Image (cartoon, rainbow, N blue to C red):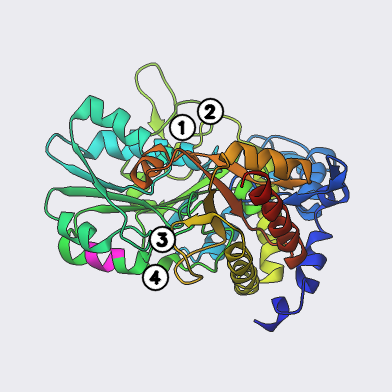
C-alpha cells in the first residue's frame, strides 16, 4: 500500500479528525499508543453523540411522536451497519450489550447455563483476556464441566495442533480471541472453523473480535462463528456499547439475559412471554446516543475503507518493529515479525520495570499501557510479570514511532 509508505501523509489527515490531538500531555505533543485499551474518538462520533442529545432526543421503541420515531430509526439502523461492516450473514442478529465483557457473560449465562453439563468440555487458550476466562470459570463452579486450555506455540500463536488434538465429542464450546490484546497474535479463524467442522461439529465457536474489528476487513461468513463479540470503544466509538452477533435462530432458542422493559412480549402475574432476538436480550432503556455514535464510527471507518486501514497499520507496524530492533536490551514478547500479528507489541527491557518505562514515556507526552493487560495466565505462561504494550491506531504516524524509539533509547541509557 503506497499511501502509508510516504511518511505520515495519510495518518496526519486522519489524525486531524481527532480533536484530542490538539492537546498537550505534560506540555508535549500528545502521542497515543494505547488504542488496544480504548481508541480516541473522531469528530464524526463526537458530533453524532451531540446530535442525538440535542437535535432529536427521545427514548426509543416507546413513542409515537416524531422524535422518538426518528431516534428509533437511527438506533435500529446501526444493527445493519454492524452486520455489513463485519460481513455477518443475513441470518445473524446484532444484540447491543455494554461491551465485550457483557456479551461474553450473556453467552455464558444464557447459552452456557442451558447447554453445558458435567462432563462437557470448553476449550479456551492461554492467550485469552480475563473476560473470556472468568465467566466460564464462574459457570464451571456451578455446573462442573471441564475447561481445557490450548497453550501457545513457539511463534506466540495459539497452538492449533494441540487445539486439534483436544477437539472431540465432549467439546461443547471453543472460545478464542481473534487478535491477542496483549501480544498481537492473529488467530487463523478459518482454520479453526474447518478443524471444528471436522472434529467437533456439535461445538459452538465463540470469537472475541475486540481487537480485530477495528483493524482489519472482516467477513464473518468465512468462519461462521456461532457467537461473535466486540466492543465499540476500541472501534473509535463511544463507551458503553458492544455487540453480540449470532445466528438469530440460535439466539431465539436461548432464555433471556435480564428481565425488564423492551424484552417482553406480554407480562402478567400468571406468566410472561418474551420477544425474539435481539430485543429478547436488551432489557431496559439502552444507551441510545452511544449506539447511534457507534454507527457513526462505522460510517467513518467505512469511508476510509478497512483494507486501507489494515494496509496503513501494517506499514506502521513494520516501521515500529524495525525501530524497536535498535533499542538496547529490548525484547519483544510474542510474534517477532509482521506476519501473523497486528499492531499490538508487548516488550520488556533489561533492568527497567515496565512501570518505570511508562512513567518516563509519560513525561515525554507518550501514552502506552503496562502490566498484565487483563491476561494474567498469559503473563504466567510467558514467565513475565507484565510488559510495556504499544498499540497502533489510524492516527499514529511514523513521526510518533521515531519519537517513541528516541524515548526508549533514553530509557535504555537511564537503566543501563
Ligand atoms: N482489554 C483492554 C486492553 O487490552 C482494556 O487494554
Q: Dot 3: few (<14), some (14–19), or many (≥20) neighbours within 10 Å?
A: few
Dividing the image into four quarters, tell me where ligand 1 lies.
top right
Q: How many labels, in total? A: 4
- Residue 24: % across, % down: 86, 45
Q: Is residue 407 magenta-colored?
A: no
Q: Secondary structure at mark 1?
A: strand
**The label number, if any, that marks residue 261 in the structure image:** 2
In front: label 1 or label 3: 3
Q: Whole-Å distance between the Cαs marked 2 and 3?
A: 25 Å
Does residue 405 appear to the left or right of 204 in the view shown? Answer: right
Label whose residue precedes the other's in the sequence (3 or 4): 3
| Camera-nearest residue between 296 and 234 | 234
Does residue 340 appear to the left or right of 14 in the view shown? Answer: left
Label whose residue precedes the other's in the sequence (1 or 4): 4
Q: Dot 1: few (<14), some (14–19), or many (≥20) neighbours within 10 Å?
A: some
Q: Residue at x 61, y 53 (%)?
A: 390
Q: Which residue is mark 4?
A: 222
Q: Quadrant of residue 197?
A: bottom left
Q: Which residue is mark 3?
A: 91
Magenta-drawn segment: 192-196
Amino acid at each position: 500500500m503506497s499511501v502509508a509508505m510516504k511518511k505520515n501523509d495519510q495518518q496526519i489527515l486522519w489524525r486531524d479528525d481527532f480533536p484530542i490531538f490538539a492537546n498537550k500531555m505534560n506540555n508535549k505533543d500528545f502521542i497515543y499508543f494505547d488504542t488496544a485499551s480504548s481508541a480516541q474518538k473522531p469528530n464524526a462520533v463526537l458530533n453524532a453523540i451531540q446530535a442525538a442529545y440535542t437535535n432529536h432526543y427521545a427514548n426509543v421503541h416507546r413513542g409515537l411522536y416524531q422524535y422518538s420515531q426518528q431516534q428509533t430509526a437511527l438506533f435500529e439502523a446501526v444493527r445493519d451497519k454492524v452486520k455489513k461492516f463485519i460481513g455477518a450473514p443475513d441470518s445473524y442478529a446484532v444484540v447491543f450489550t455494554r461491551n465485550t465483557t457483557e456479551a461474553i457473560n450473556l453467552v455464558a449465562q444464557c447459552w452456557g447455563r442451558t447447554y453445558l453439563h458435567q462432563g462437557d468440555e470448553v476449550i479456551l487458550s492461554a492467550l485469552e483476556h480475563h473476560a473470556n476466562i472468568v465467566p466460564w470459570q464462574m459457570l464451571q463452579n456451578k455446573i462442573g464441566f471441564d475447561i481445557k486450555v490450548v497453550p501457545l506455540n513457539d511463534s506466540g500463536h495459539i497452538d492449533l495442533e494441540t487445539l486439534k488434538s483436544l477437539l472431540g465429542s465432549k467439546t461443547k464450546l471453543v472460545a478464542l480471541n481473534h487478535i491477542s490484546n496483549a501480544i498481537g497474535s492473529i488467530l487463523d479463524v478459518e482454520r479453526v472453523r474447518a478443524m471444528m467442522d471436522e472434529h467437533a461439529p456439535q461445538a459452538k465457536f465463540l470469537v472475541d473480535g475486540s481487537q480485530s474489528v477495528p483493524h482489519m476487513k472482516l467477513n464473518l461468513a468465512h468462519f461462521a462463528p456461532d457467537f461473535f463479540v466486540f466492543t465499540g470503544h476500541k472501534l473509535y466509538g463511544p463507551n458503553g456499547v458492544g455487540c453480540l452477533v449470532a445466528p438469530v435462530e440460535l439466539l431465539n432458542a436461548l432464555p433471556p439475559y435480564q428481565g425488564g422493559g423492551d424484552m417482553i412480549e406480554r407480562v402478567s402475574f400468571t406468566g410472561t412471554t418474551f420477544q425474539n432476538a435481539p430485543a429478547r436480550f436488551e432489557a431496559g432503556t439502552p444507551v441510545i446516543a452511544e449506539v447511534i455514535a457507534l454507527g457513526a464510527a462505522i460510517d467513518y471507518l467505512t469511508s476510509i475503507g478497512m483494507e486501507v486501514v489494515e494496509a496503513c497499520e501494517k506499514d506502521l507496524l513494520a516501521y515500529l518493529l524495525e525501530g524497536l530492533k535498535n533499542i538496547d536490551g529490548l525484547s519483544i514478547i510474542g510474534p517477532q515479525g509482521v506476519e501473523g500479528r497486528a499492531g499490538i507489541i508487548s516488550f520488556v527491557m533489561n533492568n527497567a520495570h515496565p512501570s518505570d518505562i511508562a512513567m518516563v514515556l509519560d513525561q515525554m507526552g507518550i501514552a502506552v499501557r503496562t502490566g498484565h493487560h487483563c491476561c494474567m495466565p498469559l503473563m504466567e505462561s510467558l514467565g513475565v510479570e507484565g510488559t510495556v504494550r504499544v498499540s497502533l491506531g489510524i492516527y499514529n504516524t511514523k513521526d510518533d514511532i521515531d519519537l517513541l524509539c528516541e524515548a526508549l533509547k533514553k530509557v535504555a541509557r537511564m537503566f543501563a
